[in-house]
Image: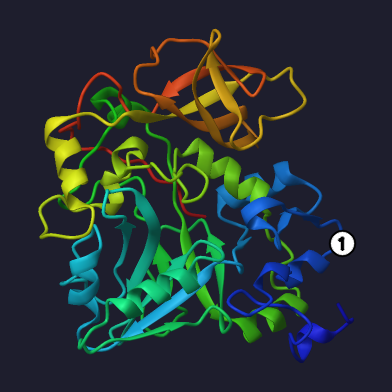
Amino acid sequence: MRPGALETDMSDVAVPGSPTELTYRSPLLERPGAVPAEGPDAGLAWHYGNPTAEQRRLEAGTAKADLSHRGVVRIEGPDRLTWLHSMTTQALSGLAPYTSTEALLLTPNGHVEHDLHLVDDGTAVWITVEPGTAPALVAFLKKMQFMLRVEVADVTADWAVIGEPVDAESTPGEPLAWRDPWPEQGVGAALYTTAEIEVEGHPAWAWREVLIPREEFGTRVAAGEFDDAAGTWAVDALRVAAWRPRLGFETDHRTIPHELDWLRTAVHLEKGCYRGQETVARVHNLGRPPRRLVMLHLDGTMNELPVTGATVLHGTREVGRVTTAARHHELGPIALAVLKRSTPADAQLVAGGVEAGQEIVVDAASGPSAVVPKIRRLPQA
């Protein structure tokens, strides 16, 4: 990148949503010590030289995270909320301005296809999605537009996303933000963990995604405003510790929301028909999810973490896969994994060649819990 280019333009940087999206490179990668991330977060910094300190600052609320590769979709028009309500897992028809929520778009068979982080500003619904998925989402929405008064646009090229560990909605007059509801149980939601874990052991988590104009983001980076940024290593470590599922990591082509305890924040069980609802209702009312999310405590004597997709073994039997592994500043090496429901809860496992013990997230022995959660969120700085 040309020195000083951020102050004037970003013409030499491919932005998400552009024809050269796969070459996206965040301006924060130009910081001294920045180490590039790989996989779905390529284009961002994995860390900036001290991932442990970055985690601690992020947890304390004194750092931000670069999420500028995320997709951004804007939907305008008077029918926008009722239209989204009819297609997604969440009750959206009465969504108040500056109130964040999460919704899933499912396949006809009930498998998770898109995870939508939604907030309405009174004029338009803003949605942030995983990197590279905005074009497919917009194409699907436009096919479902019919004669409704809605206008759908992929605005990823114009807007950047910044993550921060803040438990607060945005207000008029400040940059719009999506506040992550996890792990609160929403209205019409259900929990798939045990009562004991929910009341006593569910980890704290506070997070939101702030939207800023992409040109302004470049200018602010050049001015040093994000010199305290944390990399994806730090974000993943805190997310894994909070058992927070992420599309494309904890999900595959067979994932249903129950397996990841996603009904707590992204599904309203009392709303009307939507694509994939039959599977959601049938599993919730009559069955149990075939797989379950766990957090693994990995053998700390090993230097390498298991890679995403690594096989999890119980003895010689394959029982699941690692979805996200991370090195936490307090818990040490940890990972999220999706296992067969039949895997014994006390089984000692081997994940990608590393010995691991389970911490239960989704309960294998019963259906949804009726407990009213006592959620502990991270204290604000």
Query: Is 52 on the left-hand or right-hand side of 252?
Result: right
Model colouring: rainbow
Which quarter of the rendering shows the N terminus? Answer: bottom right
Q: Nearer the viewer, residue 12 or 122?
A: 12
Say what amino acid the circle numbered 1 marks. Pro
Relative horizontal placement of residue 206, taking residue 236 as reference (left or right): left
Q: Position of residue 332 (x, y in %)?
A: 64, 28
Query: At which x and y percent is residue 376?
Result: 36, 41
Residue 290: quarter of image: top left
Q: Residue at x 59, y 49 (%)?
A: 235
Residue where numbered disc 1 is placed: 32
Res 170 seen here: yes
Q: Give me the residue at 26% from left, 54% from top.
A: 108
Q: Is residue 15 left or right of residue 35?
A: left
The residue at the far right in this view is 3
On the image, the x and y values in percent for residue 298 come to 61, 22
Hey, which residue is sitting farthest top in the picture?
Answer: 315
Answer left or right for 216 relative to 31: left
Tell me which corner region of the image, top left, top right, bottom left or bottom right, holds residue 147: bottom left
Whether residue 276 is situated above or below residue 140 in the rendered picture: above
Please rate how many residues cluster around mark 1, counting C-alpha atoms within 10 Å: few if below 14, some from 14 to 19, many from 20. Answer: few
Q: Residue at x 51, y 56 (%)?
A: 165
Q: How many marks?
A: 1
Q: Could one spot residue 331 in this view of the protein?
A: no
